[in-house]
Image (cartoon, rainbow, N blue to C red):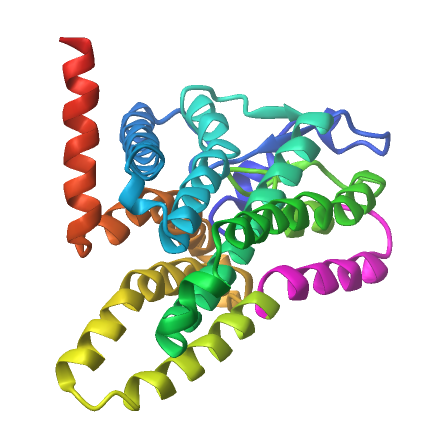
């Protein structure tokens, strides 16, 4: 493995058989990387600006108060917190050689990463349901997808993401870590932490599998089922222009789902060759850092209504400061 020598060179103090108080994050590189700090700081700033712009645009533009855009606002809010659960810590480590994080800090980072990742999965699933209702039942869309129901779906996504990880976090936090505390990652992920435990982790791995099924494959199957019915409805439209218009409303959501689930699947169902060459961390950057940055572009570049609303909000904000 690329970092084998580095991992073995950490002081013996960090590998004794007492209850550890901190973990060591190897990060993308064991040495300080000022260039990577500047690069990812720029990405982080662009992510915040893009998602805040989406939130302000949907909030202050009345014509964007339809369910599709309310879900988009909720997704952007999730993205801001999601990327903030890992990137600030990673930026700090780019400037330090000693990359320690307290046990409590690691558990907290793991919780917020799982919480916000699960919330995003649920929101993407409800967005697929929204597109299904809009295309399959266009005449009843506004009566089925009311603003109240949309807000309840968003609230359910946040509450589900908030409470589902609690069992796993408590289990992982109770594991005895006496076989080392060096995590070969840039944040406290659940699988690398379990691997460090010096006990039989079979029951813990089963619990993690159950949790993973509830927050990743289950919402994805829901999305897949929604699009099966969406495609059936689209193909029933007689005119090519009508089919194109109906499908175009789904392109942004499909792109976002493909980017998020595709990179996450490669990361967590990775092969041994990918893992041993250190590519797993590179793949995780896609859904942890780059997807939150790209989503505002994905949902705005193809949507003329959103672009016009953004211009109006930006001009309004600019005029307020001049």
Bounds of the magenta segment: 196-217
Relative placement, left or right, of 3 versus 296 is right
Picture layout, residue 316 above or below residue 27: above
Q: Position of residue 309 (x, y in %)?
A: 20, 40
Q: Position of residue 102 (x, y in %)?
A: 68, 24
Q: Depth check: 73 or 152 in front?
A: 152
Q: Position of residue 77 (x, y in %)?
A: 45, 38
The residue located at (57%, 49%) in the rendering is 119
- Name the image quarter holding residue 312: top left
Is residue 5 visible from the viewing direction of this image? yes
The residue located at (54%, 72%) in the rendering is 222
Q: Is residue 47 magenta?
A: no
Relative placement, left or right, of 37 versus 181 is left
The total of numbered circles placed on residues is: 0
Picture layout, residue 253 above or below residue 224: above
Q: Position of residue 64 (x, y in %)?
A: 30, 46
Considering every residue shown, the one lying at the far top of the view is 322
Is residue 266 visible from the viewing direction of this image? no
Image quadrant containing the C terminus: top left
Picture layout, residue 138 above or below residue 216: below
Q: Depth check: 96 or 167 in front?
A: 167
Q: Main secondary structure of the magenta part?
A: helix
């Amino acid at each position: 493995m690329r970092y084998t020598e580095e991992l073995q060179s950490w002081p013996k103090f960090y590998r004794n058989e007492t209850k550890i108080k901190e973990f060591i994050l190897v990060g993308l590189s064991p040495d300080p990387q000022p260039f990577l700090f500047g690069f990812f700081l720029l990405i982080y700033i662009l992510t915040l600006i893009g998602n805040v712009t989406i939130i302000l645009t949907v909030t202050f533009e009345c014509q964007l108060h339809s369910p599709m855009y309310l879900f988009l606002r909720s997704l952007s809010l999730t993205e801001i917190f999601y990327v903030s659960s890992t990137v600030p810590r990673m930026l700090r480590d780019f400037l330090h050689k000693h990359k320690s994080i307290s046990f409590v800090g690691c558990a907290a980072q793991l919780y917020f990463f799982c919480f916000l990742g699960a919330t995003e999965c649920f929101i993407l699933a409800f967005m697929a349901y929204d597109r299904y209702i809009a295309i399959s039942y266009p005449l009843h869309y506004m009566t089925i997808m009311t603003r109240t129901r949309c807000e309840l779906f968003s609230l359910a996504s946040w509450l589900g993401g908030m409470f589902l990880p609690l069992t796993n976090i408590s289990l992982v936090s109770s594991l005895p870590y006496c076989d080392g505390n060096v995590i070969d990652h840039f944040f406290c992920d659940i699988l690398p932490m379990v691997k460090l435990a010096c006990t039989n982790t079979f029951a813990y791995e089963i619990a993690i599998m159950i949790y993973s099924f509830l927050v990743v494959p289950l919402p994805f199957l829901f999305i897949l089922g929604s699009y099966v019915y969406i495609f059936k409805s689209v193909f029933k439209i007689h005119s090519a222009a009508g089919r194109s218009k109906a499908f175009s409303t789904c392109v942004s959501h499909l792109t976002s789902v493909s980017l998020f689930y595709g990179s996450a699947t490669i990361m967590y169902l990775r092969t041994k060759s990918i893992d041993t060459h250190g590519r797993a961390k590179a793949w995780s950057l896609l859904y942890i850092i780059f997807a939150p940055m790209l989503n505002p572009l994905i949902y705005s570049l193809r949507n003329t209504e959103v672009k016009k609303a953004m211009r109006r909000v930006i001009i309004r904000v600019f005029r307020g400061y001049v």
